[in-house]
Image (cartoon, helix red, strand yellow):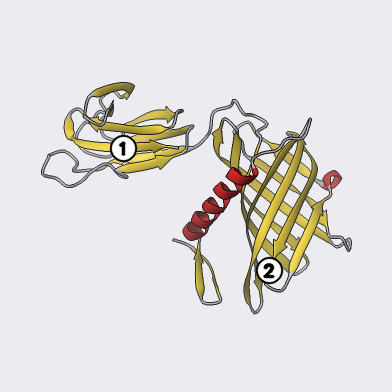
Amino acid sequence: MISLQYIKGIRITIKNMKEILFTMFFAIFLTCGISYAEGEVEIQGKGVGINNELNGASLYQTSLKLDLQNTTTISNGSVNLTGSNHEVAVQLIPQNWIFSYHPDGSFRGQGQAKTSQDDIYNVQLMGKRMYVTNNGSAWEVKGSLVKGTAQYSLYCIVSGNDLFPYTKSSLVEFLVIPRGITGPTNFTSFIPLHLEIFRGTTVVWINEDDAPHVIQSIDERGKITPFFSSNVLNTNEIFRYTFVNPGIYHYNDPLNPWREGTVIVW
């Protein structure tokens, strides 16, 4: 686990910060919904900002908004950071931006933004689509806001409509069939045994055991279901399956039926 900084004696970690932001995002998503402007895509959300100052790091609540005219043009946008004794609010200057949105849902942009006092900041943003739903998409956005020695690191979770709503998600999760899983008295199991994912995620099973294995979907009573079934996987061979619909999916290895795992799709 990588520590970001020690802020007033509290250790902020990437894992803990993401858990907090996911909670914030779902609350915003459920209460605010998604709005669309004709000919544009509006993406907005909240997160945190960190300013690495000489006397220690400062933590800021951050909001981010982007209006995309198309895959290469930002028509409007803003970044606001609010700290305990300092606030930064900037509006993007669209004509000074280089922006690109890709079919896999990722985007990159860099350009200038200004405050109401016409102070100019350089902004960089990099977004990765986390998942796709029927109502829109969600992205993880990392970036920076820089003016001279004032340098802020940004991390936000945003939601909105998608310029490529019908493309497949690039989300991938891995499940390991570990060495020594064969045999009912061995406590080794699939890693992780219970996997939670967003719809659109491709799960990849990797056989790291010396013995062959098969992945077969079953119901909660152990009866075979038609959702997915692999060929015999020898050592280092893989099986892929993309989960499109939400639900609880059970699976086992028919060659070693006492080994069962679960995939929960949101």
Quadrant, the N terminus: bottom left
Residue 71 drawn above or below residue 187: above
SS of the residue under disc 2? loop
Q: Residue furthest top?
A: 226
Q: Residue furthest front?
A: 31
Q: Which residue corresponds to the image point at 68% horizontal and 55% vertical from the top-left?
A: 63
Percent of width and height locating residue 213? 23, 31
Q: Residue furthest right?
A: 118
Residue 76 drawn above or below residue 241: below
Residue 262: give its label: 1
Q: Which residue corresponds to the image point at 64% horizontal and 41% vertical from the top-left?
A: 33
Label pair 2/1, CB-CB below 8 angstroms: no
Q: Quadrant of residue 149?
A: bottom right
Q: Which residue corresponds to the image point at 79% horizontal and 57% vertical from the top-left?
A: 90
Percent of width and height locating residue 266? 45, 37
Question: In this orientation, which residue lies closer to the viewer: 256 or 223?
Answer: 223
First along the sequence among labels 2 and 1? 2
Percent of width and height locating residue 208? 27, 40
Q: Quadrant of residue 196?
A: top left
The type of residue carrying mark 2 is Gly
Horizontal relation, residue 27 to residue 234: left or right: right
* Mark count: 2
The type of residue carrying mark 1 is Thr
Percent of width and height locating residue 223? 22, 24
Residue wearing tag 2: 83
Horizontal relation, residue 48 to residue 151: left or right: left
The 10 Å Cα crowd at callout 2, few under 14, some 14 to 19, many 20 or more, is some
Residue 251: give its label: none
The 10 Å Cα crowd at callout 1, few under 14, some 14 to 19, many 20 or more, is some
SS of the residue under disc 1? strand
